[in-house]
Amino acid sequence: MFCPHCGNSIPDNAQFCPECGVALTTAGATTPAVSTPATLAEAADAPIVPTVAPAVPSGAPSLAMAAPPAAQPLPAPQASQPLSAPPAPQPLPAPQTSQPLPVTLASQPLPAPAKKSKKPLVITLVAVLVLALIGAGFGIYQLVKYNTYNNAVSSYQQAETSLSTAVSLDNFYAAQSQFQSAEVVFKDLGSYQDAASYYQLCLDQIAVCQQNIDYLNASQTMANGDYQNALTAFTALGNFKDSAAQAELCQQNLDFLEAQADYDAGNYDQAAQTFSILAAKSFPGAADWLNKTRYAQADQLFQSGKLYNAWVMFSALGDYQDAASRAELCTVPFPATGELYHDPAYVIDYYSAATINIDATASSYPTYIHIYNGDTLVCSVFVNAGGYTSVDIPGGDYSIHTSSGEIWFGEDIMFGDVGSYQEMLFDGATTVHVDGGYIYTMVHDSSSDGGPSLSNSPIDASNF
């Protein structure tokens, strides 16, 4: 048996064509008769029209109806043969009431859709998933970065508070540690917001903390008496706080200790020089050590016979210990008025001598006189205040030096540097001629309303 729709071979008792699905007549029914063309040509040209059985509801009679054939163009008339009469219509098959026929919606099966490759869809889904993951990851990354930045800013602010209230080494170490932690985070953040600026601020404040730490360590080192290492530390700090002043104080302590060592070694001059500089800077204890050193110097001069220099130093010490009484011991009582020295070569009898009278009755100070013949000291005369004396010398040319003062240190030192030393002038000349047998008077008046009756020229005590 063959399917009237697709022409494929089917079982004789089949109700549907297994190939095209068209419903067939009831089992065992034969294919309805079709009109037979009158001629072979017509049979060849006539289309085969399948019958379609409409669906019949269950329990209702069903009628099989032939579907009208599709419109076909009429074949061209054959001139050689006349057209045959159409075949007589065939009776429709009896309706089958025992079993309804299934409804066929299409006379031709739909072609199976071509299978599309799943790879583009998978790639697209993967790409979307990757983009979604990247977007989510970037968002998480930005959130983490934002939180990291804010935490670092908070840490920096806490470090600033710690630094502003720090007073001890532990405080500054703690603040420095906080700045260092924040500095690492800001460095990792790179150019995020103003992280670079905070990074530099952290570095600056870490340095400030270190300066404070170094300063406190240097202060403790100085308190321990290690002035050399403290000096090095304060010098390295430059102008931080009062580091320069502290470095100077360390140096002064070192100088003070060195001066004390000089004193112990008997190097009084060097020790006194250092103590004097330190006392001028109000270094504690320097003034007392300076007085102590100068007293030792004065005593050393006194022991060596340099009474005037000893007197100067003892006198400068004022009321320090027994300096005043020691100064008095350095002086020599004034000699009696009269001639202290006379060169034997210039001794002459009274009647042929030239007599020089020295009148100091109006003077408030003692007077000491040298009379020279050329470079030869002929005689020396001492006249106390208010005194009067005379000397005899041969006639000739002489120069006269005179001095006065309140303190006498002997003929070598005379009045010391506190005395007055002069050379007498005679009409502008430094020498005077005297004749034997004549008397000359020299008045020495040091009262406030006058002076020496003769003019004079100051000279140094070493040239007296």
Image (tube, rainbow, N blue to C red):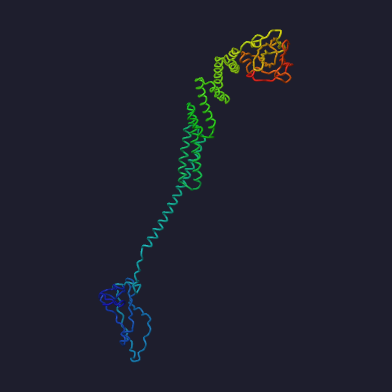
Residue nearest the observer in this picture, 185 or 403 = 403
Residue nearest the observer in this picture, 289 or 268 = 268
Residue 323 placement: quadrant: top right
Left or right of 116: which side holds 443?
right
Name the residue at the bottom extreme. Answer: 80
**Residue 141 rendering spot, x and y as whole percentages:** 44, 49
Is residue 454 at least partly visible in the picture? yes
Q: In this view, does 257 lie above or below 396?
A: below
Left or right of 279: which side holds 102?
left
Residue 393 placement: quadrant: top right
**Residue 151 rendering spot, x and y as whole percentages:** 47, 43
Give me the residue at 52% from left, 21% from top: 267
The number of numbered badges drawn on the structure is 0
**Residue 207 rendering spot, x and y as whole percentages:** 49, 38
Name the residue at the top extreme. Answer: 350
Q: Is residue 191 above or below residue 462?
A: below
Residue nearest the observer in this picture, 153 or 41 = 153
**Residue 427 rendering spot, x and y as whole percentages:** 74, 19
Residue 93 placement: quadrant: bottom left
Image quadrant in which the N terminus is located:
bottom left
Left or right of 439: which side holds 135?
left
Image quadrant in which the C terminus is located:
top right
Residue nearest the observer in this picture, 287 or 415 = 415
Is residue 285 at least partly visible in the picture? no
Left or right of 145: which side holds 307?
right
